[in-house]
Amino acid sequence: MTGSPTFGSFNIADLRKRAKARLPLGVWEYVERGTEDELGLPRNRAGFDAVTFRPHVARNVEQVDGSTSLLGTPSAIPLAVAPTGAAGLLWYQGDLALAKAAARAGVPFTICSASTMDIDQIAVAGGRLWFQLYTWKDRSLSYAVVDRAQELGCEALLVTLDLPVPPNREYLYRNGFGTPFRLNARNTADILMHPRWLLGVMGRYAMSGGIPSQANLPDRLRNRVTQSAHPGALFKQDNIDWDEIARLRDRWKGKLVLKGLLRPDDAELAAKAGADGIVVSNHGARGLDSSISSMEALPAIVSAVGNKLEVLLDSGVRRGSDVVKAVALGARGVLAGRAALYGLAAGGEDGVVRALELLKAETVRTMGLLGARDISEVTKDLLG
């Protein structure tokens, strides 16, 4: 990474500092902050910090293999890049940069239905692709994009269930970076103080066809991020029920994963509905502020459905040791969102590659220190 913007970044926290310095306040806060009183952010971190290890010694860890399979296909480590809707505002064509980096790192990438790039534009990155779904009021639009994702070879459909109504992100009103985004007295000076972002992101969009718009919608419903949404272009999740899940299960021929579960009884319903996997998640503390952390919820969910479907986890992954802790508690793997976005904002595709390299190296190092030579040896026995 010598000579790149991410040279000198030795952990995810270093990339986070670089990202924060490069982004205007409103864009940074959209990525970084939670909701309301932001109690959930430290709770997520505390969930990982509370888990300790009891390592083996003298196990000959000259060769440590961190690879595994996620949803039936090989992955370099037990990690996939989570769906994130802000990528296109952090870096020019940020979703494509994330997808290319994930392919280079040998891990799956999840396309977000809130992306500012069409699925077709992102799919050219190759690698393993999953697709995350928020539903529109007109379900025919949702089904059309699901069908397109299937045609383009996305292996899995992740249906996000933990935002039935829009969350309360008060800081967006205070910093002047609401939706739609418009210049005002509060944000103009801040933007001008971040010329690398202004020229490198928004300037490149302006030079190549204009401000990005919400993708995956018919042309008549698309709107730029600086414009109010057309009627019918807003996501509508408050009427999703298990009948809706059944319709998606019938329609989608690949792996079906339900994202945002924190309760064992909901996980049981997911298994009965024919889901292949679930993601234990509180949406990175960006939804319901007082939700239990994913790590707190994980053991009971694994106990209930771990032998029925694949259990993944997200919300708060910052270290390879976090990955190992989740796997030791019974998760098949984790999804990382903000960690990848820090790399993206710090250095584009190479920055994301650096973030994933760091997480891989830390995962393998933690396994070696625990005496675990491959993922099958990462079990509860290693926990303190």
Image (cartoon, helix red, strand yellow):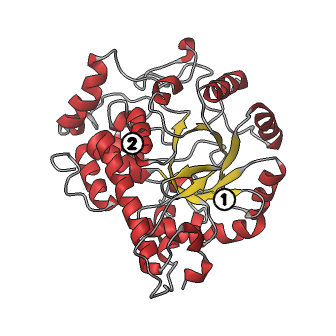
Would you identify the image quadrant in which residue 382 lies? bottom right
Q: Can you tell which of label 2 and label 1 is closer to the viewer? A: 2
- Contact? badges 2 and 1 (CB < 8 Å): no
Compared to 179, does 80 lie above or below?
A: below
Point 49% across, 73% down: residue: 373
User: Would you say 299 lies left or right of 218 here?
Assistant: right
Q: Residue at x 84, y 52 (%)?
A: 272
Q: Give whichever of 296, 302 is nearer the camera.
A: 302
Quarter of the image where the C terminus is located: bottom right
Residue 78, image x and y in percent?
53, 58
Callout 2: SS: helix
Residue 211 numbered tag = none
Residue where numbered disc 2 is placed: 101
**Which residue corresponds to the image point at 50% horizontal and 82% vertical from the top-left?**
53
72 lies above or below 373: above
Closer to the chain start, of discs 2 and 1, is 2
Name the residue rendered at 25%, 24% in the picture.
Answer: 203
What number is the disc on residue 311? 1
Confirm whether residue 24 shows in the render.
Answer: no
Of residues 38 and 318, the one nearer the viewer is 318
Q: Amino acid at mark 1?
A: Val
Q: Is residue 48 left or right of residue 245?
A: left
Q: Is residue 258 left or right of residue 207?
A: right
